[in-house]
Amino acid sequence: MRALYPGSFDPLTLGHLDLIERSARLFDAVVVAVLQNPNKTAAFPLEQRLEQIHQATAHLEGVTVGSFGGLTVDYAKTCGAGVILRGLRALSDFEFELQIAHTNKSLAPQVETLFLATAVHHSFLSSSVVKEVARFGGDVRHMVPPGVASDLARLFNRDASASSAGSAHG
Ligand code: ADP
C-alpha cells in the first residue's frame, strides 16, 4: 500500500523526518508531498523545500518527493495512495486534523487518513518554532536535518544584511 504524507514542510524538521522514517517501515511506498498553498507565504521557495526533503530522505527506500496544488484527496488519487498520513503532536492539533480528515473522507471515501503520534522528543517541534529560533540566532541543529540548518542560517543572514541595508521588505 502507498501512503501520501502532505504538508507545508517550510522547512522540514526532524519531527517530520521521524514520521517519514516510521511510515516508510509501515508502507511499501511513501510520497512526501509539499502543498503549494496560495494562502500561506512560505519562507522557503517550493524548489528549495523539495530539495531539503530529497536530501534528508535519500537513505530511505520507497520514499519519493512531490508537490501539488488543490485538493489533497485528488493528489492522493493521482499518485495511487490509499492513505493520507498526518502527525499529531498534541491535543491542539487534533480538532483541526479531525475536521480535515472528515472532509477528505466525504470527498473520497476510499482514501483513509491515518494519524501517527509524534515521537515524544520531537513533539515540541514545528516549522514555525524552528524559524523563530533561527531568526534570533539560536542553534537549530537538534531540530532539523543538516541541510535545513544551513539553509536557515543563509536565509536569516541574508535577511539581516538586507534589513541593515535599509530594505523595505520583510
Ligand atoms: P501543514 O501546514 O499541512 O500542517 P506542516 O509542514 O506543518 O504542514 O506539517 C505537516 C504534517 O506533519 C502534519 O500532519 C503535522 O501534524 C506533522 N508534523 C508537524 N510537526 C511535526 C513533528 N514535530 N513531529 C511529527 N509530525 C509533525
Image (cartoon, helix red, strand yellow):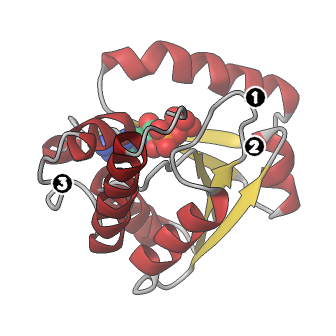
Q: Point out residue 71 in the picture as x, y percentages from the top left corner.
A: 82, 38
Residue visible at 49% across and 13% down? 95
Q: Which residue is mark 2?
A: 111
What amino acid type is highlighted by mark number 1? Lys
Number of other residues with Cα within 10 Å of mark 2, as a class: few under 14, some 14 to 19, many 20 or more: many
Q: Quadrant of ligand 1?
A: top left
The answer to whether residue 26 is above or below residue 129 is: below
Number of other residues with Cα within 10 Å of mark 1, as a class: few under 14, some 14 to 19, many 20 or more: some
Q: Which residue is mark 1?
A: 105
Q: Is residue 53 left or right of residue 22?
A: right
Callout 3: SS: loop
Residue visible at 81% across and 46% down? 69
What amino acid type is highlighted by mark number 3? Val
C-alpha distance separating marks 2 and 1? 7 Å
The answer to whether residue 31 is above or below residue 59 is: above
Q: Which residue is mark 3?
A: 140
Q: Is mark 1 within 8 Å of ligand 1?
A: no
**Closer to us: mark 1 or mark 3?**
3
Query: Which quadrant of the figure contains the N terminus?
Result: bottom right
Precedes in sequence: disc 1 or disc 3: 1
The answer to whether mark 2 and mark 1 are in CB contact below 8 A is: yes
The quarter of the picture where residue 150 lies is: bottom left
C-alpha distance separating marks 1 and 3? 37 Å
Q: Point out residue 128 in the picture as x, y percentages from the top left corner.
A: 37, 35
Residue visible at 45% across and 85% down? 58
Mark yes or no: residue 116 visible. Answer: no
Task: Return the residue nearer the eye: 162 or 69.
Answer: 162
Residue visible at 75% across and 43% down? 111
C-alpha distance separating marks 3 and 2? 36 Å
Callout 2: SS: loop
Q: Point out residue 117 in the picture as x, y percentages from the top left corner.
A: 33, 40
**Closer to us: mark 3 or mark 2?**
3
